[in-house]
Image (cartoon, grey):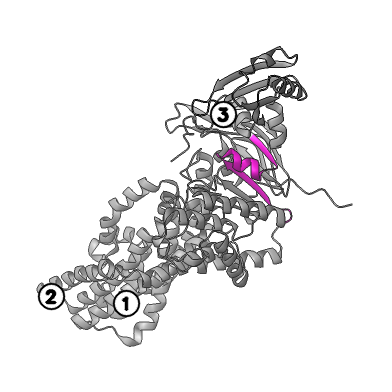
Amino acid sequence: MSAALPAAIESAALTRVFRARRKEREVAALRGIDLRVEPGECFGLLGPNGAGKTTLIKILTTLLLPTSGRAMVAGFDVARDPLQVRRRINLVSGGDTSGYGILTVRETLHLFARFYGVPGPIARRRADDLLAVTGLADRADSRLSNLSTGMKQKLNFARGFMSDPEIIFLDEPTLGLDVGAARDVRGFISRWVREREGRTVLLTTHYMVEADELCGRVAIIDHGRILALDTPKTLKRSVASEPVFELTLGTGGGDGDEVREIAGVRSFSQHTQQATGAIEVRIVVEEDHVIGEVLGMLKQLGIPVLHLTKSEPTLETVFVHMVGRGLADDVEPESETA
Amino acid sequence: MIRGGDLAERLRVNLGAVSARARVRIVASYRERSWIVGETIFPFLTMSAFVLAYRGLKAPPVYEAFVVLGGAMIAYWNNVLWSMASQFFWEKEQGQLQLYLITPVSRMSILLGMALGGIAMTTSRAAVILAGGALLFHIHFPVDRVLPAFGLFLLTLAAVYSLGMILSSLFLMWGREAWYTATLFQEPIHLLSGFYFPVRALGTAVGSFAALLPVTLGLDGIRQIFYGPAAHGLVPLVWIPPIQVGLLSLFLYLAHRSLATMENLGKREGRLTLRGG
């Protein structure tokens, strides 16, 4: 019987405290993080600025030591065996650029491939593929100094995949990219995990849709603690209390206020669209089947139903529920800079 | 324990990193030509001023040769200080130091790549100064002594760039402070190195202290190889190669330890990268 594969990423009681220069105060960026990411997973880390996402990534990529606790990547301790970890990982920080203005796009990719011992022919083929994916193929021989910021970011993204890492850490990879480029990048990540068996992605993002689309599991982190960890579907279900339906009613048969009397209707609110006169109604019911009775009554009243949708919670809903604020309401960033 | 196969693989990857990092410098030197003005013409003018001053003072002609040799050597020292030792500081400022630090290669391989690329780049500058000086001021270098002088020159470069690796670890940890300190000490070190005069002129005590700098010792030895007793050598020539080998070994060891220590300290204090979040 073969031994079980080690987790791609595993941490136990991982804590990181930053001390201010004059040691007047301490900032706990991570407070006892327990995490296990299996090989082949695309795992999302959601949290506002200062939540501890980047600190966690820095520890996992051997750039920072934990204050206490343990972190393992590909079965190796990040503090004790960083070389083994580095052979198996790569990192892309969105918004960052890589390379030197004097080099061309292709030369930059080859430069970083050499640092991982990627043989020349493989590096050439991989660079061609990545340049095509990132839309930089026609700029392959342009110097970096002649690229736009967005192009440099795409190049930085491509660089991260040149070593074909077992585990890649993507820290806000689509930050600052235009809509089309961000979509291409998401498509590439999705295919990379699906087609390359055992490859693992740890993704941090501000974009809930991105996490929902790409990640099999998501952890919501705030103030250095994991508040929730599960599949996006389960997380969304966890905050869905009672079914909510949104209806648009046509004019002519009243405002449908009578449906309040139906047993199982918890709440009923409405407002009239100024432009069309149509009535928009939000109904909370005890069970899904109650909406059938609501529709029946509206028909009896002669009120046409123009539109009906069931309102589903999103990851944003989950995030606000867990964190108590939206991603837009950021807190002060961690004071770990030099 | 490292297995043979693993060792060979590590060697292959590290050599690849050395050549890749060296290539950046070499490519830069032929794509960006603005250095010709800043790093060749201006130093050449400084060197010319010293030569003309010695002529005006009717100093022995060998002093003019000292200046030309010193002018060539100063290019390497400046390259070590400003293009190698400080490079990790600049990488950090640009936010890409972390890309180097997460690679599975030795920091010394990256620095060795910078050193070899830097040497290739600087040699063209030094060659311009040597050739220009020789032609313009009719400086004579005994051809039969070029080979031993070149041997000592290579040994000196190895020691000088190893010292650069130690300095690099200081820049890694205390970038801005190290930068100010290097700027502060630039001129005193130029003086102590005797780039434009025999270092023995500083006196035995100061000269001996200055000889701890491999560039001082190397220059002293090269001048002695070319001009014998007229070079007013500080240290007997036969001692210089073994001292340089000793300094090289010591500097390599200290660089290895210092880089590891500073990186660990940086990881503990969270000072290797710029971004938080």
Rendered image: mark on residue A223: 3
Residue at position x 27%, y 75% from top?
B129
Q: CA distance from mark 1 to mark 2?
A: 23 Å
Q: Residue at x 33, y 58 (%)?
A: B209
Instruction: Give the quadrant of residue B51.
Output: bottom left
Q: Which amino acid type is marked by label 1? A: Ala
Circles 3 and 1 on the same subunit: no
Chain where mark 3 sits:
A
Q: Secondary structure at mark 2?
A: helix
- Whether the magenta-drawn stretch holds residue A208 is answered as yes
- Chain label for disc 1: B
Of the two numbered discs 2 and 3 in the rendering, the one whose residue sits closer to the viewer: 3
Distance, label 2 to label 3, CA atoms, is 72 Å
* Quadrant position of residue A291: top right
Viewer-nearest of discs 3 and 1: 3
Residue furthest toward the left?
A: B56
Where A92 sits versus B76, above or below?
A: above
Q: Which residue is mark 2?
A: B55
Instruction: Tell me if B67 is positioned left or right of B249 in this view.
Output: left
Camera sees residue A67: yes
Looking at the rendered structure, which numbered label has been put on residue B127? 1
User: As rendered, which of A1 and A295 lies closer to the eye?
Assistant: A295
> Is disc 3 in contact with disc 1, using a CB cutoff of under 8 Å?
no
Residue B261, how many percent across, how many down?
Answer: 52, 48
Range of residues picked out in magenta: A196-219
The picture places residue A27, in percent across and down from the top left corner, at 51, 29
